[in-house]
Image (tube, rainbow, N blue to C red):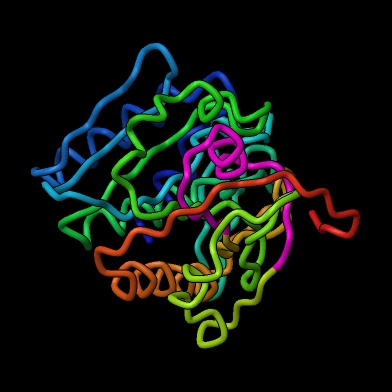
Amino acid sequence: MELLKQLYEIYSPSGGEKQLKRFTKKWVKDNITDAEIRTDNNDGNVYIVRGVADVYPCVVAHLDQVQRNHSKDFVAVETDDIIFGYSPSNRCREGLGADDKNGIWVALQCLKEFDIIKVAFFVGEEIGCVGSSRCDMWWFENCQYIIEPDRLGSSDLITNITGDLCSEDFKDYIPMKDFGYSEKSGMMTDVLELSERGVGISCINLSCGYYEPHTDDEFTVKVDLLNFLELVKTIIVNCGAQVFPHEYKYAYKSNYSS
């Protein structure tokens, strides 16, 4: 969990993701030497490719966090069960930015695990999906599907955001019940933006073990995060090299949950 705590301790508000981008790129260069990294100065995003293949699984996450309190002595405190943020000088809790640093951590673990994979880190999701709204769509043309860890809790598999995000065929490759997940509808995040822009492949957003997001009481349940990581790895293995096309169509539902 040391890498995860290092991510938490880097403050990355919307528009101020530069330090986290530097850290992430250095970590990849030091630990995954065959990965290719590209930072696009036009959109601010980070794109990483590992391996040479016709098609790639893809995991995306966002770099920015909502919290405005992040003291100079901020520390990520790890217990047997959870991780939370704390300022010793102020004697108070401060948010981790686990939304979406848990997603970044999962993406980096998958990048380390799999020889063939693509990963993208977006800026400005919390202020309107800025990075994904101006990213290069051609980068996703040889992706099989897109997985985004950007949901609170431990059990939500988001397959609908005012319209279906993925195909029924793709769902068949997701052992959701084995990992305690079930289908839910969600709200705005990067995979919706990509779907609306015509990415043309199945996308999902999943719970990745953080709770009380956007608050100073935010915390991560370690067992939930690790369970999610195993689910993502299982999906990647199950899917092999199969591509899962899907065209998003807006179909408003009034009973979706946040």
Between 173 and 20, the one lying in front of the other is 173
Q: Position of residue 256 (x, y in %)?
A: 83, 57
The quadrant of the rendering that contains the N terminus is bottom left
Q: Residue furthest top?
A: 42
Residue at 35% across / 56% down in the picture?
Answer: 2
Image location of residue 210, percent across then percent down: 61, 59
Looking at the rendered structure, the number of numbered marks drawn on it comes to 0
Which residue appears at 17% of the width and 35% of the height? 36
Above or below, 241 against 249 in this view is below
Looking at the picture, tell me which residue is in the foreground, 27 or 79. 27
- Assign the C terminus to one quadrant of the image: bottom right
- Say which residue appears at 26% left-offset and 52% top-offset: 56
**Magenta stretch contains residue 199:** yes
> Whole-percent x and y of residue 53?
14, 50
**Residue placed furthest toward the right:** 254
User: In the figure, is residue 25 to the left or right of 221?
Assistant: left
Residue 123 lies, with reference to residue 50, above or below; the image says above
Quadrant assignment, res 193: top right
Q: Quadrant of residue 126?
A: top right
Q: Residue at x 36, y 39 (%)?
A: 140
Q: Is residue 207 above or below residue 70?
A: below
Q: Is residue 97 magenta?
A: no
**Which of 80/167 is in front?**
167
Q: Is residue 145 left or right of residue 27?
A: right
- The span shown in magenta is 184-205
Q: Quadrant of residue 120?
A: top left
